[in-house]
Each structure stands twice: as C-alpha cells, then as structure tokens.
Image (cartoon, grey):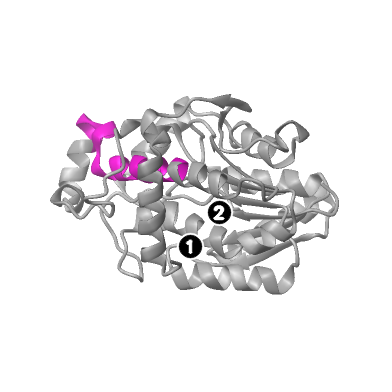
Amino acid sequence: MPGKVCLVTGATAGIGQVTSRELACRGATVVVAGRSPERCAATVEMIRRETGSESVEALIADLSSLAEVRRLASEFTARHRRLDVLINNAGALFELRRESADGIEMTFAVNHLAPFLLTNLLLDTLKASAPARVIVVASGAHKDVQAFNFDDPEAKSDSYTASRGTSLLYTLAMPWKHPAFIQYAETKLANLLFTYELARRLAGSGVTANALHPGLVNSRFSAGAGVYTWFMRQMMRFFGISVEEGAKTTIYLATSPEVANVTGQYFIKEKPAESSPASHDRDAARRLWELSERMTSTA
C-alpha cells in the first residue's frame, strides 16, 4: 500500500484500530478518525511504535454531529489531495433512545447518516484518486429486520423511549428483540442499501463500494451505553472472535488485488455472501438516499 492514503473512522479501538495498524504496516498513509483526542493520540503513537511508520495521523470528530462530519471531510481534504481507501467503520448502539446535537436519533445518525455524508463529501477526492475503494462495515444484524422502516426511521415510537427497567426486562427475556437492537439492525440494513446504491451511482468511475459483516467481535463496542450493551459485550466475550480476526475482511477489501474491480458486494470471512432480500430493494435504496440527502442537506 505504499503511496496510498486511507481514512478509517472509529479507529481508536476494536477492529478499526487493528485495520489502521495493518494498513500502516503495509506502507499506507493512514488517517485515523475518532472523537477522543486522547485516544486518537494514543492510537497514532501505538501504530507508529508497532509498525515503524511515521505516516499515521489523526483527525478528531464526533460523527453523531453533521457539522463535525463536514469538518472532518474539510480537514482531510485540506491535508490530502488523494484518498485511495475510505473505511466507514464507526458504529454505535444505545440502550435508550437519544438524540444528537442535530435532533436526530443517535444510532441512525452515527451508523448511517455519518457514513452517507462523509462519503458524499469525499466523493470528488475518491474519484480523482481512482482506482479507489469505499468500504462500509455493516453487520449480519441487518437480517433481523424485514424492511427499512420509512415510517419511523428514527425510532420515535414509545418502545424505544422505555425506562431502564423495561430495558432490563428486554435484556433478560428477549435480548434480540430489544428496541435498541432493532434500531441497530435497521441502521445496518441502511448500510447495505446505501452501499449497493452507491456502487450503482459510481459505476464506471473507478471507485468501488463494498460492505462486510465482521462477525461477532469481542470488543469494547458501545462501552458505557447501558446495561443492554454491557450484556451484549458479555455475549461477545464468551462467543465472539478476536478483534484481529474481525478486522480481516475489512483489511482484505482495502488491500487485496482480487477485489480491485469488485463492487456492490457483501462479504463475510473474505468471501462474497448473500445479504437479505430487503437489502436488494432498489426502490428502498433510492428512497433512503433521498431521505438521507434531505436530512444531511446534501440534495
């Protein structure tokens, strides 16, 4: 990867951090993006120490904020003329419904609108750098919803504004039906609808777009977000794979010549896989794109 520039969001922990380290190890210039200045600095120092590469830097942004996403894109393009690989890795899950600074439900803001906006803001740079790659870290959880809920994309229904006591009941009795998980699954379906639509719109540009499921990874995912996310991390602790294993497919899609011309695909364990029928709904993908444009003021 010498000479290539890679931007990785959610890069200060878990598979994002491993991905960033491995890209630096392969000679790429790596820009790690995270919301904590301290953790970003520690990640840059760790990668430089372990790889011997000085071509590692950080950009600070809270991706729940549309203004911060715009600033991230602006600061990146001010520093770099090219972008060979954009990895939309950052993601979150919140036990109780919360809204961002923009008044948008947080899971939807971080998991879908942030990568949608960031990718669109960097499209000109990606096209000018072609061949280039956009990689979206999705999840097999997208199969837990039958279709994207255009009637309530921000989960404003009462079920997701429940008390911590109700959340505990869901956690103990029906963890996979917890409203927080359903909203997370909804945003992961949005990731795939976005990726497939992006691939269609980029046809012939030299920029590919692919998504992946990293597996159930034992990481700090959504640490501190409540009892439900604590429970989920315990499940990952006992049944999950390591962050090194979880990062393999992202690294493969970012570096392998085998997928240089592959676009609009979903990968699991470095192999193409079939996503849900709902993820291939072209009308839903178009509607979601238009909704996202309106919500991010990019139309």
Position of the C terminus, as image quadrant, is bottom left
Q: Earlier in the sequence, mark 2 or mark 1?
A: 2
* Left or right for 223, reference 49: left
Q: Is residue 94 visible?
A: yes
For the stretch drawn in magenta, the main secondary structure is: helix
| Residue in view at x 63 percent, y 67 percent | 59
Q: Position of residue 136 (x, y in %)?
A: 55, 45
Residue underneath mark 2: 10
148 or 37, which is in the foreground?
148
Q: Residue at x 55, y 73 (%)?
A: 71
Where disc 1 sits, the SS reads loop
Q: Which residue corresponds to mark 1?
A: 63
Horizontal placement of 130 versus 161: left or right? right
User: Could you tell me the amino acid type at mark 2?
Assistant: Gly
Q: Quadrant of residue 76?
A: bottom right
Query: Range of the magenta residues?
Result: 171-192
Give the quadrant of residue 211: top right
| Element carrying mark 2 | loop
- Residue toward you, 274 or 176: 274
161 up-or-down from 169: above or below:
below
For residue 175: magenta?
yes
Which quarter of the picture shows residue 235? top left
**In the image, what residue occupies the spot 85% across and 52% down?**
52
- Local crowd at mark 2 within 10 Å, few (<14), some, or many (≥20)? many
Q: Are marks 2 and 1 in contact (CB under 8 Å)?
A: yes
Indicate whether residue 55 is drawn in magenta: no
Q: Is residue 173 above or below residue 192?
A: above
Q: Which mark, by number, is residue 158? A: none
Which kind of residue does numbered mark 1 sit on? Leu
